[in-house]
Amino acid sequence: MKGVRKADLPTKTCPVCNRPFTWRKKWERVWELVKYCSDRCRGEARKRERS
């Protein structure tokens, strides 16, 4: 079998929606910088920042 089980991947908690999200291959090089689980949450964080 090839690969890693999803349960074994690192996770973080999104500061906007407080949901856990899992490492993705496309975030491989920037995982330390990833803060939000989605574009929607990143947008919400920016809205809150401006207010």
Image (cartoon, rainbow, N blue to C red):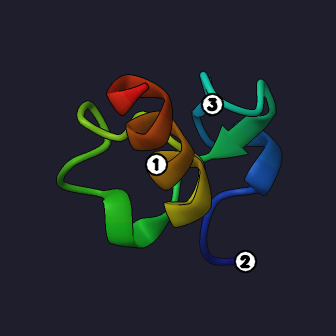
Is residue 13 in sight in this rendering?
Answer: no
Look at the numbered disc 3 and give the secondary structure of its residue: loop
**Three-letter residue code for mark 1:** Arg
The residue depicted at 21 percent of the width and 48 percent of the height is 30
Viewer-proximal residue, 18 or 9? Answer: 18
Within 10 angstroms of label 2, few (less than 14), some, or many (20 or more) residues? few
Q: Position of residue 31 (x, y in %)?
A: 31, 42
Is residue 10 in sight in this rendering?
Answer: yes
How many numbered callouts?
Answer: 3
Query: Of callouts 2 and 3, which one flags the residue occurring earlier in the amino acid sequence?
Result: 2
Query: Of callouts 2 and 1, which one flags the residue occurring earlier in the amino acid sequence?
Result: 2
Q: Position of residue 13 (x, y in %)?
A: 66, 24
Mark whose residue sits in front, 2 or 3: 3
Q: Is residue 17 left or right of residue 14?
A: right
C-alpha gap between disc 3 and disc 1: 9 Å
The residue depicted at 30 percent of the width and 57 percent of the height is 28
Label number found at residue 42: 1
Viewport quadrant of the C terminus? top left
Among all residues in the image, which is located at the extreme front? Answer: 51
C-alpha gap between disc 2 and disc 3: 31 Å
Q: Which residue bears the numbered disc 3?
A: 14
**Three-letter residue code for mark 2:** Met
Look at the numbered disc 1 and give the secondary structure of its residue: helix
